[in-house]
Amino acid sequence: MYLRLSDQQSNLKSKIVFLLRTAFQPVISIAWFYYLSHSYLRQAALSDVSLLDAIHRPFYDRNNSPYQRLALLRNHYQLNYQMLGKNLATNLFFGETLNISEFTGKNQQTYRLALFWGQSYKREGGLTLGLFLQDTLIQCLTFSLDRHQQHVIIRVGGMQSHNENTRELIRETTKNLHGIQPRLLLIDALRFIAQEIQCSTIECIAKKNHIYEAWRYKFNKRIRAEYDNLWLLAGASLRHNGNYLLPLSAEEKPLDSRPSNKRSEYRARDTIKQAIRHQIAQTISPPAMPSEHKHYLPA
């Protein structure tokens, strides 16, 4: 509380709102503050007080209750710690990225996939997977790690493009990657991560459940991405809660069923995907599942 109220970058209004939200939701607020103060996130919270506010704002799904939000936040950061290790999990908050794959397109330009903490996407999830051309972010996918009993779950909260010349850059990237759309490449890479960490489920947010469809953002945020169509294109099925269940692997047609004049292109696509899969396997470690009663990890 002292950290939040003494922050020099926050105005008086935001501090008053923080106090009011804490007073209206004391149990989950105190539980979240306790978790932050007793975990590796303590250092990050000292430099970014928005972590304290996270419990009071929609996260991943606008329909989640405060208690569901608390559980998801704690589960994500516990599993993130176990997957990446304390140093990297902490350093992500200070701008560090984790390169998980690097490959070249047919024009010999170098592309890379990297995990980072996206300040702009922090309400959609706790980790962002980005496709970069050198240092230019082309497109990214934001997700959180969760658990149910002894199963790891990935919850995808958003897909974004991030460049003023996005449309042309995406078109050029698709061409250079032998016809692979960047957004579908990100989904494939996420599937490879899911397989590596022994994930049982990938749930993708529906547009109507996106956090920026919550009433508080109605007048200052707009969802342009057609999430539902994207997840269906990737082979997802509709869940009872309105979100989408994404298969852990894509359905691939045999190469000999492809038109003969297109087979070299499909071979090149497969080469890129297999290189990504191999490099992810060398980088990502499966998290050990914590016991149900363990609520924080050592600082």
Image: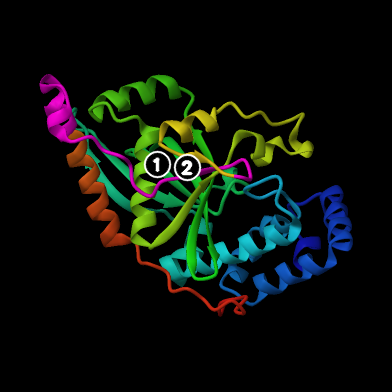
Q: Which residue is drawn at 65% across and 39% down?
A: 209
Q: Give the range drawn in magenta.
A: 240-267
Can residue 1 be seen here? The reply is no
Residue 295 is situated, as x and y percent measured from the top left of the image, at 62, 75
Write down the quadrant of residue 184 in the picture.
Answer: top left
Q: Residue at x 47, y 29 (%)?
A: 163
Eyeballing the image, is 119 above or below 283? above
Q: Would you call the spot at circle 2 few (<14 residues within 10 Å), some (14-19), or many (20 or more)?
A: many
Q: What residue type is labelled 2?
A: Leu
The one nearer the camera, 44 or 215, is 215
Q: Residue at x 89, y 56 (%)?
A: 20
Image quadrant holding the N terminus, namely bottom right
- Disc 1 is placed on an element classified as helix
Find disc 2 in the rendering and name its residue: 141
Residue 112 is situated, as x and y percent measured from the top left of the image, at 31, 43
Q: What residue type is labelled 1?
A: Ile
Q: Distance between the residues labelled 1 and 2?
A: 8 Å
Specify which label sits upstream in the sequence, 1 or 2.
Answer: 2
Q: Which of marks 1 and 2 is in front?
A: 1
Residue 244: within the magenta?
A: yes
Find disc 1 in the rendering and name its residue: 187
The one nearer the camera, 10 or 288, is 288
Q: Would you call the spot at circle 1 few (<14 residues within 10 Å), some (14-19), or many (20 or more)?
A: many
Can residue 217 be seen here? The reply is yes
Residue 234 is situated, as x and y percent measured from the top left of the image, at 41, 35
Image mark for residue 219: none
